[in-house]
Amino acid sequence: MKRTLAPFATALSLALSTPVAAQEAADMARIDILPGWQMDNGHRMAAIRIRLAPGWHTYWRSPGESGIPPSFNLAGSDNLSHMELHWPVPELFSDNGMWYLGYEHELILPIELVPEANGDIHLSGTMDLGVCKDICMPMQAQLNATLTPEGKGSMSPQIKAALADRPTPVANAKCNASPLSDGMRLTAHLTLPSLPSNAVAVIEHPDRSVWVSEAQMQRKGGTLEVQSDLVPTEAQPFFIDRSALTISVIGGGRAYEAQGCTGG
């Protein structure tokens, strides 16, 4: 199998703010917060909005053969247990024989914030991302916000649309892992409808230090076989928690996503 570097899953945290920009990239991407609404379960649904200049793009959480994945650092925040990013379906692009996954024009990225206790959530941190056209520019935004339970806001149509544009869940994904001299080879089987010939697959491991090769795909009737090599920093066979993997297949404006897989 060709061993080409593919991005890893990212442990994510985020801080929010009023519109900000960073360094010389300010004219290429402008970031602000859509405050969203207080959910019935006590969580807060908000969103980061990234507005891009014409011709510029930014990247999905695992960009592909090229690209800069976004990263978030939530340092100094108060009353936040954890958060979950609800990524909308990315576009599949190709350039100079390489493919990447990302967004043009605008990205609305819904964020579900889980407080530690009742009361305000104060967020403080940074967002790092790449914005690209003919060249790529790193961008860092300093982001801060205080969200109060009383500030329920409205159920933003933009956030609702982004939530509706998430990948289609795939149930009952099967996978097995076999040892290699320096890691493990994971082979997953997903029941999926027919896909465009240029569709791509991405296997994500929650530990970013684990190197994950570009996924290879093979159709067998109604089943798609997806295979990647996973190599830890120790470069030896290791235990893979299959329930913690994310397997995505993207193409033709559609995406399918399996959260975990079982032996088979």
Image: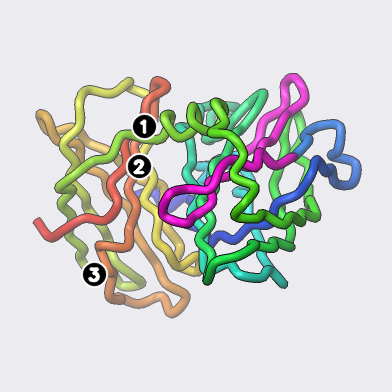
Q: Are marks 2 and 1 in contact (CB under 8 Å)?
A: yes
Residue denoted by label 1: 255
Amino acid type, residue under disc 3 in the picture: Pro
Image location (x, y in percent) of residue 176:
17, 59
Distance between the Cα atoms at labels 3 and 1? Answer: 29 Å
The residue segment tinted magenta is 32-58
Query: Element under label 3?
Result: strand
Res 132 quadrant in image: top right
Amino acid type, residue under disc 2 in the picture: Ser
Query: Element under label 2?
Result: strand
* Residue displayed at 49% across by 27% down: 161
* Residue displayed at 31% across by 35% down: 256
Image location (x, y in percent) of residue 77:
68, 68
Q: How crowded is the residue under tag 3: few (<14 C-alpha within 10 Å), some, or many (20+)?
A: some
Dot 2 or dot 1: first in sequence order is 2
Residue denoted by label 3: 179
